[in-house]
């Protein structure tokens, strides 16, 4: 309908996308076949049927298992390109994509294989589709500080092509404070800093991400709404929240899409954006996320345009590039 056409036509930036979470079941079979990797499913339908999660950890267990089919530079390039094709079709002009190097280095895939493959896909997306992109290296927070430092050292030859660092994986029990020293080391290397916080974890973890990690952007941040002082702080400082509506429903952090707080966030003066998180696992790419909140919350064109504009304002693009998109 009219609103769907309006959403499709809005230029967007995607700021919260795990590239490993864009691995579609069809591609999982293809990579498994060409790499001779066994997967515990017979059909694409059986894979999709397994994507019923009651919390973040349920999802992560399946997501890390799925990543085992990714082995070569070509796999990472093809994975990235397939994402950019879908994103471009949804009106994405710029994407800042997360990758989880430890998921791969821990099973013997070199950091460079992952990085070079993704960078090749990003370069091709820019020339072929006109979609610009940047890479964000995420540390897995269920692993220890030493492993994160080791990963940062492995990344050294590629740091001129990596925009920033992030923090993801199992949130509860792994507060931002665990990675304060790694984040300090990264800022000295000129890297931007983002972190998942307040997805399942409490508002206190968002305070820690601000105070101890010095984040430039907040991934999810939903639980900030429990803390009025924090909401005021986030609004006053113009902090961007990378909100992921379908992810929130699939991981049972929000009971249903029509109960999603996206419009409440905007009304509170928070710079909220709409993103897809792990689209192959959560039922849709960025356009699907916009349409879901538009229908579920009755958003008007002004609110939708504000969300899209926020995505460029919250990006790591230079001001002149932001101006060309807004
Ligand atoms: N890794 C991939 N998706 C994630 C999410 N939504 N939260 C934490 N870690 C993740
Ligand atoms: Zn995420």
Image: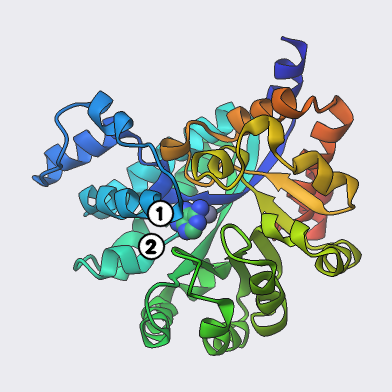
Q: Quadrant of residue 6?
A: top right
Residue 24 location in percent, x, y? 35, 35
Give the vertical position of 295 relative to 145 (above or below): above
Q: Quadrant of the C terminus?
A: top right
Q: Nearest the camera: 212 or 198?
A: 198
User: What residue is shown with label 2?
Assistant: 115
Q: Is residue 295 left or right of residue 23?
A: right
Q: Quadrant of residue 176?
A: bottom right
Q: Is residue 68 left or right of residue 303?
A: left
Q: Is residue 258 left or right of residue 109?
A: right
Q: Residues within 10 Å of mark 1 (few under 14, many from 20)?
A: many
SS label for mark 1: helix
* Disc 1/disc 2 C-alpha distance (Å): 5 Å
User: What residue is shown with label 1?
Assistant: 118
Q: Does residue 98 appear in the picture of this structure?
A: no
SS label for mark 2: helix
Residue 190 location in percent, x, y? 62, 80
Q: Nearest the camera: 57 or 75?
A: 57
- Does ligand 1 reach within 8 Å of label 2's beta carbon? no
Q: Residues within 10 Å of mark 2 (few under 14, many from 20)?
A: many
Q: Quadrant of residue 1?
A: top right
Q: Is residue 135 left or right of residue 217?
A: left
Name the residue: 33% across, 60% down: 114
- Assess whether mark 2 and mark 1 are in contact (beta carbons under 8 angstroms): yes
Question: Residue reaching furthest top?
Answer: 1
Residue 4 location in percent, x, y? 70, 18
């Amino acid at each position: 309908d009219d609103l769907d056409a309006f959403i499709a036509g809005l230029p967007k930036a995607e700021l919260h996308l795990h590239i490993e979470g864009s691995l579609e079941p069809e591609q999982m079979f293809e990579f498994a076949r060409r790499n001779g990797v066994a997967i515990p499913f017979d059909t694409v339908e059986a894979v999709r049927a397994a994507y019923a999660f009651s919390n973040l950890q349920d999802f992560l267990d399946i997501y890390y298992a799925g990543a085992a089919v990714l082995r070569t530079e070509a796999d990472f390039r093809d994975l990235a390109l397939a994402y950019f094709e879908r994103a471009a079709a949804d009106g994405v002009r710029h994407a800042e994509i997360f990758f989880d190097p430890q998921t791969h280095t821990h099973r013997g895939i070199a950091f460079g294989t992952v990085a070079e493959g993704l960078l090749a896909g990003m370069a091709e997306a820019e020339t072929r589709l006109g979609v610009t992109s940047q890479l964000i290296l995420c540390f897995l927070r269920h692993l220890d500080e030493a492993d994160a430092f080791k990963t940062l050292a492995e990344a050294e030859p590629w740091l001129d092509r990596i925009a920033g660092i992030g923090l993801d994986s199992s949130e509860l029990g792994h507060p931002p404070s665990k990675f304060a020293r790694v984040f300090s080391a990264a800022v000295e290397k000129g890297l931007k800093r983002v972190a998942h916080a307040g997805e399942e974890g409490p508002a206190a973890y968002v305070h820690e991400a601000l105070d101890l990690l010095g984040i430039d952007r907040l991934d999810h941040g939903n639980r900030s709404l429990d803390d009025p002082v924090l909401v005021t702080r986030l609004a006053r400082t113009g902090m961007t929240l990378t909100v992921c509506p379908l992810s929130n429903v699939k991981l049972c952090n929000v009971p249903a899409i029509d109960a999603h707080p996206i419009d409440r966030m905007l009304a509170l003066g928070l710079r909220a954006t709409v993103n897809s998180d792990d689209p192959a696992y959560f039922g849709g790419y960025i356009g699907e996320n916009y349409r879901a909140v538009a229908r579920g919350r009755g958003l008007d064109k002004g609110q939708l345009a504000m969300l899209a504009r926020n995505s460029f304002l919250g990006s790591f693009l230079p001001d002149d590039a932001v101006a060309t998109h807004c």
